[in-house]
Amino acid sequence: MQKIAFVVFTFVIVAMLGKLGFWQLSRGAEKLKLQQQVEETAESTAISDLTLLPTAPLWHRVSLVGVFDNSRPILLDNQLNNGRVGYHLYLPFRTQERWLLVNLGWLAAPPYREMLPVIPDVHGEQTITGIIAPASSLLTLKQEVAPTQWPLRVQNIELTELATVLDRNLPTWVIQISATNPVALKQNWQPVVMKADKHYGYAMQWFVMAFAVLGMAGWWLLRESD
């Protein structure tokens, strides 16, 4: 009876470790596909007319002319840069076709939570270059500031809610501005946070652990049968 329970327990553990390994392999494949897509579109010609965007616009390069709305700054909270806490600054941007949300980059946070960083004004007509990216989405604990207060400090870029707060029709993506743009702040945003090879490395660790558990279980069973 003890051996049967041990075998069942071993099987459960090995199955869990194997499942984690295969999950990491699938995540690695997804990240590899994304990396390839980002690299391919990064080499393409920038699109200057939003009406010419493909059905799946993510990761395409754009070059757009328009005006920023400095009265509605949005601060994405909990953005680290070399271990220092800060924000990503998003501003509404009006092109001839529509309103967009543009991530200008990273701003350092003041020493006290109740303080907000000094936000630069970007006046006049601007030409911005960048790539189309999905909105940032993390676990939301609470809304820090009421929607009527500007700058608006948020935990996530929830485009549906922000469209209501801004009273603007926004697309389901944002523009990540290029580091070479004159109005760009410090750029630390990455399209792929964890590379595919890291997922494959984690998968190997889970599989090694599964084989180690099998080996130890086999050794114990052989010893008990002597």
Image (cartoon, rainbow, N blue to C red):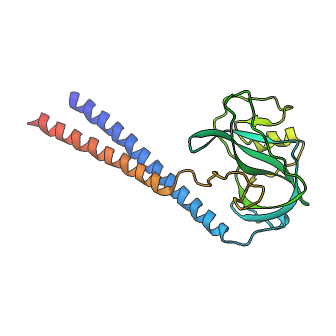
- Residue 187 percent across, percent down from the top left: 66, 53
Residue sitting nearer the eye, 168 or 111: 111
Residue 47 position, x and y percent, is 78, 68
Q: What residue sits 78% from the left and 39% below the top? A: 118
**Where the N terminus falls, by quadrant?**
top left
Quadrant location of residue 161? top right
Where, quadrant-wise, is the C terminus in this rendering? top left
Q: Is residue 95 left or right of residue 27?
A: right
In the picture, residue 221 is in which quadrant? top left
Left or right: where does residue 185 sit relative to residue 125?
left
Question: In this picture, is 54 found above or below 105?
Answer: below
Q: State how many labels appear.
A: 0
| Residue ID at (66%, 29%) | 141
Residue 74 shows in this picture: yes
Q: Evaluate whether residue 1 shows in this view.
A: no
x, y percent for residue 13: 35, 37
> Image quadrant of residue 116?
top right
Where 199 falls versus 52 (above or below)?
A: above
- The x, y position of residue 195, in whole percent, is 51, 55
Q: Residue furthest left?
A: 226
Nearest the eye: 43 or 213: 43
Using the image, determine if residue 171 lies above or below residue 151. Answer: below
The residue lying at 81 percent from left, 41 percent from top is 162
Could you tell whether 176 is left or right of 81 in the image?
Answer: right
Query: Residue at position x 85%, y 42% from top?
Result: 72
